[in-house]
Image (tube, rainbow, N blue to C red):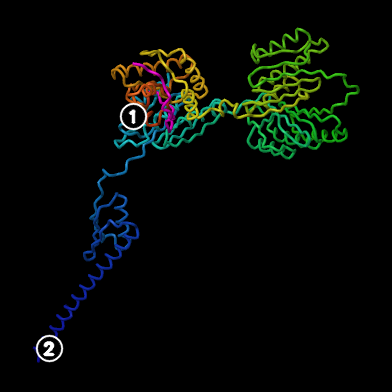
Amino acid sequence: MRLSAIAIVTLTFFSAAGLCLVAAGFAVKAVESNSESGVRMALDDNNLPWAEVQADGLQVLLTGTAPSEALRFKALSTAGGIVDAARVIDGMEIKDSGTVKPPRFSVEILRNESGVSLIGLVPAATDRETLVSRLATVAGQAQVTDLLETADYPVPDQWGRALAFGVKALESMPRSKISIAADRVSITAMADSAEARRQLEVDLARSVPTGVRLVLDISAPRPVITPFNLRFLISEGRGRFDACSADTTEAQTRILAAARSAGMEDRGACTIGLGVPSPNWARAVEQSIAALAEIGTGSVTFTDADITLLAEEGTDQALFDRVVGELESRLPDVFALNAVLPVPEVSPSAGEITFTAVLSESGEVQLRGRIGDDTSRSIMENFAKARFGSDAVLSAVRSDEALTDSWTVRVLAGLEALSKLSNGATRVTENTLSISGTTGNERASGLIAALLVDKLGEAADFTIEVTYDETLDPIAALPTPEECIARINKIIETRKINFEPGSDTPDAAAGGIISDIADVLKSCGELPLEISGHTDSQGRAEMNQRLSEARALAVLNALRTRRVLTSTITSVGYGMEQPIADNDTEEGREANRRIEFRLLTTDEESQEGGEDGVADDAQTPQEEDAVEDADDGDEASE
């Protein structure tokens, strides 16, 4: 009995131990399974599918190849958020760094009076020595500071063209910052005037390479307006500006709003400039325009701080006195008002004395009417010839010694105002002066108004009817490169440039053709053109090659003698390599002997610039070849 009791206790003890071991095994398996599944779900939720999870007891082993060190650390952190971080074992590897994405190459070029500086990262293949040498030429005596770093990665596709364009742009902008990337060039610069800014923007937009985005921020100093002038008129219930000046954008908005309230129907234009006589300019203009609108008809003229309000003859005297009195009491300090209500003439003159000058579109000027004595007539005619050209003036005026010197002054003022227009007319009477016509200068009306006030006085009665014509604007009317090459090809469609047989000397008829082409190029500005010479297949290839080169160069030199800018024009000879017709017939050989003009494409210009992308003389790129006719050309003979 005693042995049986011991056996039972022992058996019970071992049975309990066995059950504990079995339970512990199941518990470990459960912990491993839960840890592994929990970490796996967390990795998937954080977009880390490359990480493998394996649980070994309480430890969690992470394996796999991480794309980067940051993602490896992210995987460890994710696993540590599910289980105790001390249980996580890092068995991951990092992806080979040789596959890392190349850096973004960029250069920032700064240019000012102190010199030129380069900052940024460029491909190792970039010829830095050539780049710095080119910039040294641009900087002149100033210093070039090279702070560039390099990286040995493949050169981006557009890098060379973008860099060449940026360096070329720097030449025309002494105060600028140019940021260059393979797909984008940002230019921040300052121009000398609004006109210079417009021209610069046109030139840059025309020359930007295909595939490169151009971002411009070009500012221009505001013009100095002397005198700071404004002239607003109301006639038949409608208002308009002959001249308008403002010192700020806010003042411009307020002035135009006041004009619209007074009956101006168009958008109106007001030049923002320097030279305002008072910070209260906009307030004084608003009050004066409102006063004129209350009177109904007339004009208000500002010359710096002097204001002249001219009412129409016949305006009610009581109304005029009240409006003028209220305006005088409200005007800001500094401004002085001169109000004029014309008195009707008691006995009008028997015949009206007039002087007229008409400027035609061809530039001829016809003078009619009366002038003072012979001396005054001589002064007037010489003045007209100086303004319009000796051969352009046709005078049919007659002397009238009864006229005073003030009449001559009015006539000369009318002629000077007319010289501001492309075509038009001026008419001078005893009481008024009118100027009308068209112009390519948007500010012509304001300039004429300031001129007449200066010459005739603030209370002078004059009218200005000037229309802006964009086609007459030398900048706005600039033709596109495609339009220019089309005009050249139209010339040589029916008029071939021929040469003396076996020579590179153009024949007698070629001179007129080249002159017409030169006229087109002068109106187009600098274009990236290629003049190519071609021959037929007769004769030796080497001789034909030399002859085609010489003839293309002869045309280029002929354009130079006609004062055409040729820095962006090249001459190339192709010999007999590019026939456009059958060389077995005389007609075909005639067609193959030719001179062609075509625009250089962006890719062709890049090749000329060299492998580092810095061209010796960067040209204006274009997107398409405009040569379309097989008959364009030059007759060449072996």
| Residue 140 visible somewhere in the drawing | yes
Q: Is residue 632 magenta?
A: yes
Point out the stretch of residues depicted in magenta: 616-638
Which of the marked residues, 2 or 1, is nearer the chain's N terminus? Answer: 2
The numbered mark at residue 126 is: none
The numbered mark at residue 5 is: 2
Q: Is residue 290 magenta?
A: no
Which residue occupies the extreme left position in the image?
A: 3
Where the N terminus falls, by quadrant? bottom left
Which residue occupies the extreme front position in the image?
A: 585
Q: Dot 2: what SS? A: helix
| Residue 116 visible somewhere in the drawing | no
Which residue occupies the extreme right position in the image?
A: 346
Residue 34: x percent and y percent? 28, 68
Dividing the picture into quadrants, the one containing residue 598 is top left
Which residue occupies the extreme bottom position in the image?
A: 1
> Which residue is labeled 1 in the image?
612
The one nearer the camera, 497 or 447, is 497
Give the amino acid at mark 2.
Ala
Give the amino acid at mark 1.
Asp
